[in-house]
Amino acid sequence: MKSNIVQEFKGYINNVPFDNQEIYYSAEYILNEIEATFDIEVPFTLVRDIKYMLQSAWDNLSSQTLGEVEYDFIVCIEGALSIDDLYLDSSCICDELLKPINDKLKDWDNTYGKDPIMFDFNNNTL
């Protein structure tokens, strides 16, 4: 047998690096919905937190389940009156992974809302 990886996946959202294609596309979809619904640009810290939450849950998720998570989050996004009213919930993701994000969303102006849109590789650490 001869196997060879020609190219591994590498993507960025607001300069936050992704090496898992499925997590990248899922995060991009969720974050695009947040931006479109609330007419905002998401900061790199929200991108980072969504990425880490999805990565942490990845071992227990299949591609089909990841689609269910996306659907659950879109329902939450569409049901929220404002960004600080947004509460992400999915039966496929444990509450302890979602709590830090939901706490920051609830206090948007003092958390995510203060953060820069793009991650600065020279001055910050992910």
Image (tube, rainbow, N blue to C red):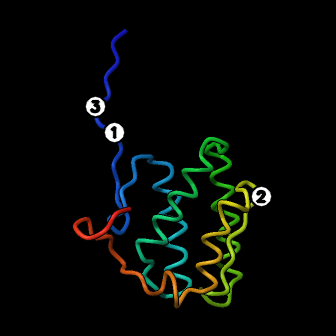
- Residue sitting at 42 percent across and 82 percent down? 41
| Kind of residue at badge 1 | Glu
Q: Is residue 43 above or below residue 13?
A: below
Q: Position of residue 99 (x, y in %)?
A: 67, 68
Marks 3 and 1, how far apart at CA: 7 Å
Q: Quadrant of the C terminus?
A: bottom left
Asked which quadrant contains residue 94, the reply is: bottom right
Which residue appears at 32% of the width and 65% of the height?
Answer: 15
The spot of residue 77 in percent (x, y) is 64, 77
Tell me if mark 3 has few (under 14), some (14-19) or many (20+) residues whose alpha carbon lies within 10 angstroms of its own.
few
Residue projecting furthest to the left: 122
Indicate the secondary structure of the residue bearing disc 1.
loop
Q: Residues within 10 Å of mark 1 (few under 14, many from 20)?
A: few
Q: Residues within 10 Å of mark 2 (few under 14, many from 20)?
A: few
Q: Is residue 96 left or right of residue 41?
A: right
**Disc on res. 6:** 3
- The label on residue 91 is 2
Local secondary structure at mark 3: loop
Q: Gap between marks 1 and 2, in whole Å? A: 31 Å
